[in-house]
Image (spheres, coloured by chain):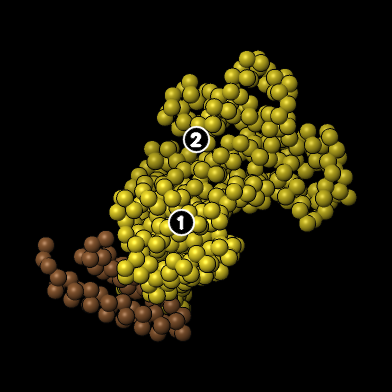
Amino acid sequence: MSRLNILVVEDDPLSREVMDNNLAGHAVDFASDKAAAERKLKAGHYDICFLDLLLGDNDDYSGLKLIPLAVSKGVYSVVMSSCDTEETISRAYALGCKEFYVKGNEQQNLAAIIARYMRDDGGKKAQQIFSGDFITNDPETRSLVSEALKYAATELPLMILGPSGTGKTTLAQLLHGHSGRAGDFVAINCAAYTEDLLESELFGYKRGSFTGAHENRKGKLAQADKGTLFLDEIGAMSQNMQVKLLKAIEEKSFYPLGADKPEYSNFRVISATLENVQKLLAEGKLRFDFFQRVHGMTIGLKPLAQRKCDILPLMQAFTKGKKRLAFELAARDHLLAHNWPGNTRELKRFVELIGAGTQGAVTLETVRRHITPAAAPRQGITEPVTQAQYDYALEHGLSAAVDRFTEGLIARNLSENDGKKAAALAQLKISKCLLYAALAKARKAEENHNG
Amino acid sequence: MADVEKIYHNLKSRAVGLKSAAELLPNCAPEKRDKVIALMRDAAKEIERLLTELEAGPRP
């Protein structure tokens, strides 16, 4: 996270100390009265200004009077006050403050405010994300990830669905990076352990609690204190384990194996599975009460075969800083025609293989040698619709779902063809009428979205 | 703001400050810990003073 310039306008020395501690890592400046705050706002270049409203015993809402100055200097203004009457809140927002908080929960609130500020920093962040941390040109995936990022700085659990190799762990790391949480990102693949081993990995153990436990060991829950616990492949977890974990998630406390006292950990859960969650629930493999604790918001990642516009950008990213590859046209077409059943992981391995075994100019023959078409699943027959599409149809009706699917296909095709409408008409075999109707709808939806 | 309202506001503000400081105290660096405790004592004294003022004032 980059270092921000922050001004805290606060008359109470204890509150200043609290802010100073909670804003560690940023350049923090303080002003204890209106005159000092005005001087600093005029002279300095601050990103965020936290304002108390009453500055001194006989003060008449000096903090409110500072908001217009801060706003005129382009500073993101946040009120943190104990004075939270409806009238004061309305006045603060009318004067241009961006967020209003009642004092008393600084640790969580400050982290959330800063994460939100960083995310909304002029839309530059989104561009950086999609060309760096989570590479995608697919409009639907971009929209899903952007939506998920809005929840990154909350306490809500998140669930990521998608086939193996679609970037579930990368997305979980991205969400943790935008959460503002000071602790670590701790990942565990639940399918990689037996029930007993999973329990000791998650909860940790005390010395002597079982044969071979020669010393105390911290579990993943404790390691994820103030951070994020990423539970991959939760569908592989036993019912018994789900009950134990459910309690730990609910109470944020747990007993390591062999411990007689509980331990506490303030972790946030992000879970993932490649399986169909509804099927897991219907078959009783996933407990409904456990599911409820881990699925605050669900993000469904599409397989690479459904976002082929990402193949070339991902390949470029995989060769960044290494030998660059040049594919002849036929080789490129072959790559785009392949289904990539192993998704991003398969693509990365392919790039590594090609990079190690060729001079840099890649022919169709080389590509054919390293791609096994037989491995490709019969897409469209095994899974004609994605879970996200199905859920959307249930919520909004078939007609709306068909419209959305049509618009998505057209948007993707236009994106792959640099916006050339003639190509979309020819490749999708659609009428001009349908194309322009879909574009008009998308424009209207965007206008509504932008308010 | 009326005097009694100011007392309530200041009480709330000091008490919340104490709560937030108590939360950060366990993770406070040793060199800062004493400073925070001293400030917390000042805040506690101020709460005591405000309560006395409230007792002495007119009852609702």
Most extreme residue toward the left is: B59
* Residue at (44, 81) in percent of width and height: B32
Q: Colour of chain B?
A: brown
Q: Which mark is residue A67?
A: 1
SS state under label 2 = loop
- Report which residue position mark 2 lands on: A451
Q: Nearer the viewer, residue A352 or A120?
A: A120
User: Can the viewer see residue A432?
Assistant: yes
User: Can the viewer see residue B19?
Assistant: no
What amino acid is labelled 2 in the image? Answer: Gly
What amino acid is labelled 1 in the image? Answer: Ile
Chain hosting mark 1: A
Question: On screen, A405 above or below A355?
Answer: above
Dividing the picture into quarters, in which one does residue A404 lie?
top right
Which percent across, then down, holds residue A438?
A: 59, 22
User: Could you give the CA–CA distance between mark 2 and mark 1, rounded to whole angstroms?
Assistant: 24 Å
* Residue at (39, 71) in percent of width and height: A11
Q: Nearer the viewer, residue A293 or A67?
A: A67
**Quadrant into which the N terminus of chain B falls:** bottom left
